[in-house]
Image (cartoon, rainbow, N blue to C red):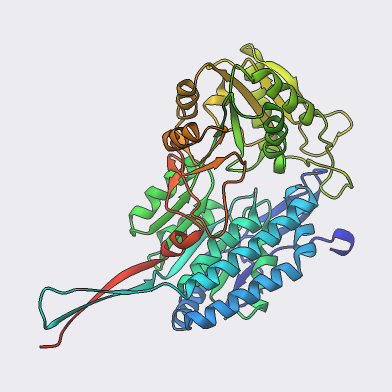
């Protein structure tokens, strides 16, 4: 973006930008320097009604658009995202603080979701069922659910928007997006890309505003038939209650706190370096980020040394700084949360092996040093709360069984990681881990073509893959008597 100018966000209704008529004007903050980037006005009740009317009209048109035509448009969206990756990525860095290269990668990854979902949407096959009577025919068709309300988190606003919007559109639904308060302009740029690629007006809409002013009314509307949310378990439980009154379908990707188990036959130095790089991506603000490193005592020392050395080498800076490897946290409250967890662990006997404080030389911005903790007691709050920041506790264990017990000892179950050269242990431990996704000898746990989601209090439903598209369709049985 030339001069890094900030485009004040607006609502997007029926294919055009609309200034919200709400009384509240919200500010957007640059996390690298705490300065105000710009502002936007929230939606008013009359805006919400126009939004619902637009989405309803868009759905009626889009559901009648053939799967082949929808696929062609989604491919055009993917191409538009790739073409504008630098510009949108710069905006993403401006709002969230993440490193520019990570932002551009996020945009390109978003494009992959549209390519895959578009193609798979052409293969949402119905089927026939053999009937009991010769005069009967049983045919099952898949129909789109209707209007989908998508609530987007601030850590990956572009990638998560694509992960929710692409499969919903491929299924034939219309979508209302609510971007995070921290990154509305990035999501609006994404919506514009979709519109300019040929998406009919009303199929994709965007609303701005607080949970009280926007989320509650839309959750109460019967017109909204499905809700897809990425965020905290606490908010997810509120949405479950709100959805009950109108029996909305829910797809919930909630908290994480992923374990990374490192067994004694793994390469401790190689895994230690990889662990630091994975942990501190996006300043640790990743729902599938490894956040508990459970390492066998036989190799915990070389693993720790390698991880600490790699952590200390990480260069902090603005996402636009050349050579910077980690930017600030996105919000002040997130940095305060990290500081609280680190101080709690320290007060209970944990050793600070790297980082542990705000960095010197950064008087402005929500920066915090990448931190490694050792000798963390079981009573530390960091085992009860997802840190969602640049903090890595290392936990030594004596056996494979103890490692599995530690891994499963939390209420979340989104992703988990396992490093071993034993086929037997790889099979047994990955099957025993109570998570929705396992990275085996890799810290990668997601792909557009594979299901993404968790178990326990990490939510239910799946994004991505064929399962992700099927979340937005329902089966209709057509029983015909030909006698």
Picture coordinates of residue 299, whole percent (x, y): 64, 20
What is the number of callouts on the image? 0
Picture residue at 69% right of the left edge, 73% below the top: 79
Q: Is residue 301 left or right of residue 64?
A: right
Picture coordinates of residue 461, whole percent (x, y): 42, 53
- Camera sees residue 178: no
Nearer to me, 115 or 54? 115
Picture coordinates of residue 37, whole percent (x, y): 79, 54
Picture residue at 66% right of the left edge, 78% below the top: 197
Q: Is residue 292 above or below residue 167?
A: above
- Camera sees residue 228: yes
Image quarter (top left, top right, bottom left or bottom right) of the N terminus: bottom right
Quadrant in the rendering for residue 374:
top right
Q: Is residue 33 left or right of residue 146?
A: right
Q: Is residue 414 above or below residue 311?
A: below
Picture coordinates of residue 235, whole percent (x, y): 49, 44
Query: Which residue is outermost to the top?
Result: 349
Q: Is residue 94 left or right of residue 126?
A: right
Query: Which residue is outermost to the bottom?
Result: 483
Quadrant in the rendering for residue 40:
bottom right
Picture residue at 72% right of the left edge, 52% below the top: 27
Q: Is residue 32 above or below residue 9?
A: above
Picture residue at 59% right of the left edge, 56% below the top: 160
Image quarter (top left, top right, bottom left or bottom right) of the C terminus: bottom left
Quadrant in the rendering for residue 267:
top right
């Amino acid at each position: 973006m030339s001069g890094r100018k900030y485009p004040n966000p607006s609502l997007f209704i029926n294919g055009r930008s609309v200034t919200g008529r709400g009384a509240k004007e919200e500010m957007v903050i640059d996390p690298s320097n705490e300065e105000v980037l710009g502002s936007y006005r929230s939606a008013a009740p009359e805006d919400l009604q126009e939004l619902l009317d637009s989405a309803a009209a868009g759905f009626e048109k889009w559901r009648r658009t053939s799967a082949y035509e929808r696929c062609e448009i989604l491919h055009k969206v993917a191409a538009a995202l790739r073409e504008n990756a630098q510009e949108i990525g710069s905006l993403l860095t401006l709002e969230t603080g993440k490193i520019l290269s990570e932002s551009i990668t996020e945009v390109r990854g978003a494009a992959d979701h549209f390519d895959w979902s578009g193609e798979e949407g052409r293969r949402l096959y119905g089927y026939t069922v053999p009937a009991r009577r010769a005069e009967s025919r049983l045919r099952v068709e898949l129909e789109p659910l209707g209007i989908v309300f998508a609530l987007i988190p601030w850590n990956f606003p572009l990638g998560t928007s694509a992960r929710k919007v692409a499969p919903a559109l491929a299924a034939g639904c219309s979508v209302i997006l609510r971007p995070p308060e921290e990154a509305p302009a990035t999501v609006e740029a994404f919506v514009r890309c979709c519109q300019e690629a040929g998406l009919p007006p009303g199929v994709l809409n965007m609303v701005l505003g607080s949970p009280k002013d926007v989320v509650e009314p839309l959750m109460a509307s019967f017109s909204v038939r499905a809700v897809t949310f990425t965020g905290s378990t606490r908010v997810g439980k509120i949405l479950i209650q709100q959805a009950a009154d109108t029996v909305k379908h829910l797809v919930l990707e909630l908290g994480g706190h992923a374990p990374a188990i490192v067994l004694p036959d793994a390469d401790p130095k190689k895994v230690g370096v990889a662990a630091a790089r994975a942990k501190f991506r996006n300043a640790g603000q990743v729902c599938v980020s490894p956040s508990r490193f459970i390492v066998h005592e036989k190799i915990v020392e070389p693993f720790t040394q390698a991880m600490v050395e790699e952590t200390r080498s990480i260069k902090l800076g603005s996402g636009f700084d050349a050579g910077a490897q980690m930017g600030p946290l996105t919000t002040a409250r997130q940095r305060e949360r990290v500081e609280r967890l680190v101080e709690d662990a320290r007060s209970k006997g944990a050793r600070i092996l790297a980082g542990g404080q705000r960095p010197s030389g950064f008087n402005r911005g929500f920066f915090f040093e990448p931190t490694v903790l050792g000798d963390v007691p079981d009573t530390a709050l960091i085992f009860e709360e997802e840190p969602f920041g640049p903090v890595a506790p290392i936990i030594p264990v004596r056996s494979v069984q103890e490692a599995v017990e530690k891994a499963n000892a939390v209420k979340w179950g989104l992703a988990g990681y396992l490093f071993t050269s034993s086929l037997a242990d790889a099979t047994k431990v990955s099957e025993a881990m109570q998570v929705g996704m396992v990275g085996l000898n890799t810290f990668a746990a997601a792909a557009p073509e594979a299901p993404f989601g968790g178990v326990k209090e990490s939510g239910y439903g799946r994004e991505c893959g064929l399962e992700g598209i099927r979340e937005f369709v329902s089966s209709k049985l057509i029983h015909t008597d030909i006698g």
